[in-house]
Image (cartoon, coloured by chain):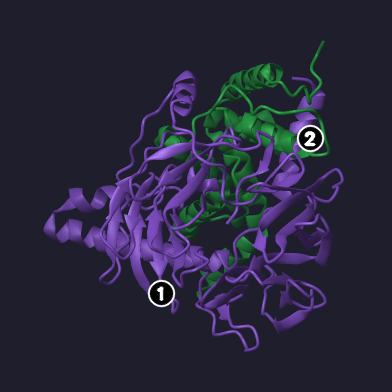
Amino acid sequence: MRDTDAEFTDFVRAQSPALLRTAFYLTGDPGLAEDLLQTTLTKVYLHWPKIDARSAAPAYARRTMVNTATSWWRRYAWHREKPRDDVPDRNGPDEYDGLDERAHLIATLRRLPARQRAVVALRFLEDRSEAETARLLGCTTGTVKSQTSRALARLRQDLKADTYHLIEEDR
Amino acid sequence: MTPQTTERIKQVLTAEAAALLPPTNLAEKVIKRGRRLRRVRSTAAAVVVVAAVATAVAIPIASLNGPDDQAPAAGVIREGELVTVNADPGGPRLSTAEFDKWYAGLSQGAGPRLPYAAGGYVIDGAVRVRMPAITTRQVIAPLGRVNGGWLLAAQKTGLEWETRVITYGILTTKGDFRQLAQGRLLGVVISPDRTQVAYATAEPRPTAVVVDVASGKTVASTPVQGDDAKPIGVRWWNPSGVWLDTAQGSARWTPGSPPDAALGRTVRAPARESELLQDRDGNCDRLLDPDGSPRIQYCGFSDPGTLSPKGTTFVTADGRAHGVYQPRDVQLQLIAGFSLGNASWEDDRYLLLSGSSKPNLLIRCDVTTGGCEAVPTDRRITHPPVN
């Protein structure tokens, strides 16, 4: 194995758990997250010799992943599941509420358009600043702010509209 | 959105994400795929320069450049005499009202002929058995029928795999739960005759273990080579044997004998009654013979397809049912909103699918005609039917 391949292998071992989490935040689906991770890393590998500073590789990989996820969404969204505005019927509360809540929250997040989901993932799940999120998304901080605002409004609307009342809202 | 809401979403998604593990040999897979793409690119460039036939070749290749590019386009990957079926995605995109109208218009079929979980019960035909009580942050799910009951798995979520506690056990039709194993466990599979289960454990050393369902006794075990990036696991059990996930890729293990040499890559053995294996490479699904040699491939799909239990039909992500051994191509009468992600085969003819956003809506599709019908269930489904 060439040295560059050894370096790349080290990079994958070190970064793949965190990148897989990001992929899951972006897709909301474990299988898609794995596909997104592999596609992203393949692209990084193709450009590996051109990435001069190895310390820049994680950010490059994240940006590639966000762009790939957005691209996938654009090209395949019509072909895949249709976001729904309603939620499954349910009976009274029992010890399985936690399972329902998890599935519901993930479904709610998946309803967001790819760009808004990416903003939520980077800003709130990975605790990145507006400036860093803007750099990763290749847009301005103003765009990050507006996308964040729209995403939160959409989440608020969806979560308020549901019949679960699992999450306390402003009164 | 309140800080509590943000925190709750973060907590839930972080817990789900923490349970994910990168695939085995990820770097090796990526490097192999990357080298192949480089070869394709350099070949394409030469063709462009010498023969000036840029359009047909360079467009799919050019799409691989830069952070905004795509997975390989359909038809880029070709090996040997493989028969390639390229994607022709289709299907209507419906509004919520149209979706509901479509579902309401389906004919009503019989209930699922596979077990599923709803409201804390395993439901299997007319039988309903209460699952053991669970605690907060723990997920419990039926994984399939075994002799005398069902295999259940329970795990605490939100923890890294190093500390995650998993329990496998048998729930009998009388409602008794018998634990088979607990600890840092790495997958469990059911034998084709449903009399045994195989699981992998990381402690005290990486080992695959086969347990007899009736007696609970260990009948075979083998040490398995793992690596630091990804521990070993058991992935599938088909008529060829138990398929182990090792540091060197998938390896077939016949309990009682040492495992065969690993294939060098990770594959799936998705059909309980067929020896065919399934490999995912880029946007292609490949069906392989037990020695890893490719038989047929289906390309152009962002999501993997599903193989019927006996291996006679492969349904691609666009909802087309392809005959594996006989020429057949049937478009299932599906709409967006039902994906193959939660699909389960009742047998080689009937496929159950649940709604992506509405998992309590089940449909049954006949892969020989393409027709689909609604399937009545307990509406509190927490885990879809499993074969």
Above or below for B228 versus B120: below
* Residue B289's disc number: 1
Q: Is residue B84 left or right of residue A139?
A: left
For the point 65% across and 33% down, which residue is it? B379
Residue B354 x, y percent position in the rendering: 54, 40
Residue closest to the far front: B126
**What quarter of the picture does the C terminus of chain A occupy?**
top right
Distance in Å between CA atoms under marks 2 and 1? 43 Å
Residue A147 x, y percent position in the rendering: 59, 22
* Local secondary structure at mark 2: helix
Residue B6 x, y percent position in the rendering: 76, 28
| Observer able to see residue B338 | yes
Q: Nearer the viewer, residue A81 or B20?
A: A81
Q: Is residue A136 left or right of residue B225?
A: left
> Which hue belongs to chain B?
purple
**Which amino acid is tagged 2?**
Asp
Q: Residues within 10 Å of mark 1 (few under 14, many from 20)?
A: some
**Which amino acid is tagged 1?**
Asp
| Observer able to see residue A127 | no
Q: Identify the residue under disc 2.
A: A97
* Local secondary structure at mark 1: loop
> Which hue belongs to chain A?
green
Q: Residues within 10 Å of mark 2 (few under 14, many from 20)?
A: some
Residue B260 x, y percent position in the rendering: 55, 85
For the point 58% across and 66% down, which residue is it? A9
Tell which subunit mark 1 falls on.
B
